[in-house]
Amino acid sequence: MHAWCDGGEWSSFESLGVPVSNVQAVPLTGFVSACSAGEGTCDVVAGAVDGRLYHAVWSRDA
């Protein structure tokens, strides 16, 4: 999930998608971390039951 603040109000949440491995959705283990490398970006990292870490990136320019 992703939301942003324009300095006054928060946006609605939007999905960044489901981690995919070999064209199948992978259930998460329960932890998800999000950060921003700069203005207009959001990076999300999640652990999955297959033992891998998945990384999704959102950019307002994409």
Image (tube, rainbow, N blue to C red):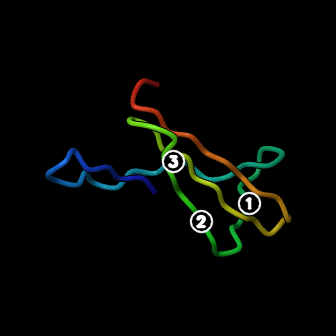
- Count residues near mark 3 (Cα–Cα under 10 Å), then give few for <14, some for 14-19, many for 20+: some
Q: Amino acid at mark 3?
A: Leu
Q: Position of residue 34 (x, y in %)?
A: 53, 57
Q: Position of residue 38 (x, y in %)?
A: 45, 37
Does 15 appear above or below 29? above
- Count residues near mark 2 (Cα–Cα under 10 Å), then give few for <14, some for 14-19, many for 20+: some
Q: Which residue is mark 2?
A: 32
Contact flag, marks 1 and 3 (Cβ < 8 Å): no
Q: Which residue is mark 1?
A: 26
Q: Which residue is mark 3?
A: 16
Q: Position of residue 10 (x, y in %)?
A: 22, 55
The secondary structure type at the circle numbered 3 is loop
The secondary structure type at the circle numbered 1 is loop
Does 10 appear above or below 39? below
Tell how many labels: 3
For the point 68% across and 68% down, the residue is: 28
Q: Amino acid at mark 2?
A: Val
For the point 48% across and 46% down, the residue is: 36
Q: Amino acid at mark 1?
A: Val
Does 34 appear above or below 37? below
